[in-house]
Image (cartoon, grey):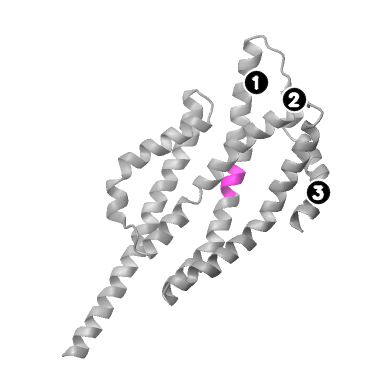
Amino acid sequence: MSMIAALFVVGDVLHFLRGRPPASLVEWNAFSPWEGVRMYMYIAAALSLVVAVPFTMLQIWAFAKKGLRKSEQKAALKYVPAAFVLLLVGFAFAYFVVFPMAFRFTTSMTKNLGLVETYGIAQYFTFLTNIVVPVSLAFELPVLVMLLTRLRVINPGLLGKMRKVSYMVLVFIACMISPPEFFSHISVSVPFILLYEISVLMSKLVYRKQMQTDAGTKDRMNYGSA
């Protein structure tokens, strides 16, 4: 149903994106008779996923919660709104900051080489997706770390030991999705590193609360046995 509904709004979405920079600064082209149809269905599928994913996650949750205790179920549900908000923030940062920066760099290189800017609509959206998706998912890191800490899979001590390796991985990802110049690498790497440090801080808060709860439970057990 979501796919059918998306088919009716694809045109409006494309016109909206086409009217905003950097898309408005270049001309979209179709390099095959089927490219327009293929991109129309691609955008419709992407829009339908936005609607379908919450329902899919609900079904996954209904299956997974049977293996969790009541306290773990409540803890997991608390993080859902935060995960959604962080996903939107990540998408906004990727679309309005990282993507225009990367697009300006690539177009400037094209002009410097004396090449004619002729962009296919499929190539444009592939480039957009390759940047927006990983950056948006990276903003889920604090919520994921808090949830794993709450489930006692990881702890602040482990995150501290993994800091150097995590920094290297995050900087590598930032370099892969940003233009190959120093300022762009820094502009993407710094938010990623800050997200990691925020994740460590959130993990410490959750872990400290767990230790306090465990200590209180242990005292009550000792008192009862006495």
Q: Nearer the viewer, mark 3 or mark 2?
A: 3
Residue that mark 2 sits on: 26
The disc, 3 or 2, on the residue closer to the chain's N-terminal end is: 3
Q: Can residue 74 be seen in this view?
A: no
Residue farthest left in this picture: 226
Q: Which quarter of the image is occupied by the N terminus?
A: bottom right
User: Disc 1 marks which residue?
Assistant: 107
Where does the magenta region start and end?
89-93
Q: Mark 3 points at which residue?
A: 7
Q: Main secondary structure of the magenta part?
A: helix
Res. 197 in view:
yes
Please tell me which of labels 1 and 2 falls first in the chain. 2
Label 1–label 2 contact, CB within 8 A: yes
Residue in front for this viewpoint, 113 or 41: 41
Q: Position of residue 203 (x, y in %)?
A: 37, 58
Q: What element carries label 1?
A: helix
Residue at 78% x, 44% y: name it: 13
State which quarter of the image contains the C terminus.
bottom left
Mark number displayed over residue 154: none
Residue at 36%, 36% in the rendered image: 168
Q: Where is residue 45 in the image (x, y as percent from the top left)?
A: 71, 47
- Name the residue at 49% across, 23% down: 181
Mark 2 is surrounded, within 10 Å at the Cα level, by few (under 14), some (14 to 19) or many (20 or more) other residues, namely: few
